[in-house]
Amino acid sequence: MDIQTLQSQSVPSFSIKIVYLLGKAYLLVPDQSKIRHVLIRDIVRLEGVRNYTIIHLKNGSTMISSRTLKIYESVLLEANFLRVHRAHLINLQCMSKYDECSWLATMQNEDIITISRRKRKDFQSRIALI
């Protein structure tokens, strides 16, 4: 077996985790044949689409991961992320404003996210802490 085959076999069993390098927090995201290090502060939001997760970054780029949003939610809970909808996990540090009347959160990259009815209580309590 060559090295390339070993790397591609190890990625599917890789678990999502946060690592700290030189005082910065990185999220390790498995990509097709490698592991990508993404600065957590650069992640604006994560969007769940079936069994995939789209990671939206501050610079406007996106990454696709074959892991579910539920896996990312459990890992990013400690990093000030909150699931506000069945399909959205947002970085509360990247939220620029929210409208209490319409329950819409506007992110730094101008994405508008609806806060679901069932997540509103959690959202309000987390916003009060910030």
Image (cartoon, rainbow, N blue to C red):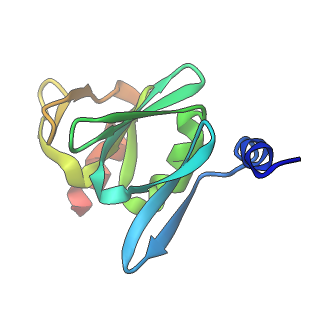
In the visual, does 106 lie left or right of 20? left
At 36% from the left and 72% from the top, the residue drawn is: 24
Quadrant of the image for the C terminus?
bottom left
User: Where residue 43 appears, x then y in whole percent?
Assistant: 32, 48
User: Where residue 101 appears, x then y in whole percent?
Assistant: 11, 27
At 59% from the left and 43% from the top, the residue drawn is: 71
At 73% from the left and 46% from the top, the residue drawn is: 4
At 23% from the left and 55% from the top, the residue drawn is: 93
User: Which image quarter: residue 45?
Assistant: top left
Task: Please identify the residue farthest to the right as the structure is shown.
Answer: 1
In the visual, does 59 lie left or right of 121? left
* Position above or below: 20 against 44: below
Task: Report the front residue among 42 and 35.
Answer: 35
Task: Please identify the residue farthest to the top as the structure is shown.
Answer: 50
User: Where residue 72 appears, x then y in whole percent?
Assistant: 53, 45
* Position above or below: 107 against 7: above
In the visual, does 110 lie left or right of 75? left
User: Where residue 9 appears, x then y in whole percent?
Assistant: 79, 43
